Image (cartoon, helix red, strand yellow):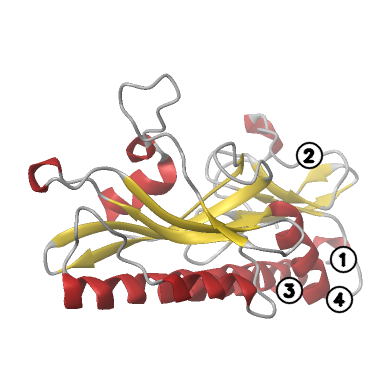
Amino acid sequence: MTGGGGAEVAQAAAAVSGLVERVFVTVARVRDAVLHAVERDGLPAGRWVLPDGVAQLLREPGQLAVGLGLVVAPRPEEGLRQRLEWWQAEPDGGRLHTLEPDLRPASLGYYDYTTTEWYDVPRRTGRRHAFGPHVDVHGTGRYVLTLTEPVVAGSGFVGVAGADVPVRRFETSLLEALGPLPAPFVLLNDEGRVVLSTAPRFLVGSLLTPDAGAAGQGAPIAGVPWRLLPVRHGRLLAG
């Protein structure tokens, strides 16, 4: 990315897109497992749809995700309440466990996932979505990216399949893919928040001022609401 050249920016954006697609391959395998189970057994109110074997995706070599699963669309008229069928890997790569947030509406700690961006956007648009970076307060406690896509069966919207990827792991994998450290760059989401940065001035998670990087500038990342901008002398370039 020397000098902020367009070819180098495009190369970095392509590397980001490649990692995103790797995660969505995992998400698609979760989705397919859901569809297979729903086709076979329907969507039972009292038990999980996903088989335990899906959790083993977290142990596959090169896996970026530390959490994955299905977030069920509630259907009160059918007795189907909010439910997360979600597995997580321990930070040390040890045992897998299920996520058990408080889904009781009357509770002070109630987690209404239907209002979250990572759930609502795929539900409304029918398209996949990348949300973050955000602190996974109901799970790992780490800074993560959550990538989701809708699951739609013959009976309609089933919920979203998704995966959580630690920002640090995503960054490490990206820099490995790029090879020798390129000129600094910043990856922004659609609200101008820093998803990833190799420039010390721009911290991951920070929200940039409007003049720091105008909307539409930089190289878009295919399929997700992100864009990549090179940095020169501490300033963002259009790319």
For marks 2 and 3 on the same chain, the one whose residue lies earlier in the sequence = 3
Circle on res. 1: none
Q: Is disc 2 surrounded by few (<14), some (14 to 19) or many (20+) residues within 10 Å?
A: some
Circle on res. 7: 3
Q: Is disc 3 surrounded by few (<14), some (14 to 19) or many (20+) residues within 10 Å?
A: few
For marks 4 and 3 on the same chain, the one whose residue lies earlier in the sequence = 3
Measure the C-alpha gap from mark 1 to mark 2. 18 Å
Measure the C-alpha gap from mark 1 to mark 4. 8 Å
Check disc 4 and give the amino acid type: Gly
Measure the C-alpha gap from mark 4 to mark 2. 22 Å
Dot 2: element: loop
Measure the C-alpha gap from mark 2 to mark 3. 25 Å
Q: Say above or below: 4 vs 116.
A: below
Q: Badges 4 and 2: C-beta atoms under 8 Å apart?
A: no
Which residue is denoted by mark 1 in the rendering?
Answer: 182
Check disc 3 and give the amino acid type: Ala
Quarter of the image where one finds residue 126? bottom left
Which residue is denoted by mark 2 in the rendering?
Answer: 203
- The image position of residue 2, as x and y in percent, is 88, 66
Measure the C-alpha gap from mark 1 to mark 3. 12 Å
Q: Say above or below: 166 vs 233.
A: below
Q: Residue furthest left?
A: 77
Check disc 1 and give the amino acid type: Pro
Out of 65 and 102, give the one closest to the viewer.
Answer: 102
| Residue depth check, mark 1 versus mark 4: number of the one nearer the observer | 4
Q: Residue at x 44, y 71 (%)?
A: 52
Q: Is disc 1 surrounded by few (<14), some (14 to 19) or many (20+) residues within 10 Å?
A: some
Circle on res. 179: 4
Out of 178 and 110, give the one closest to the viewer.
Answer: 110
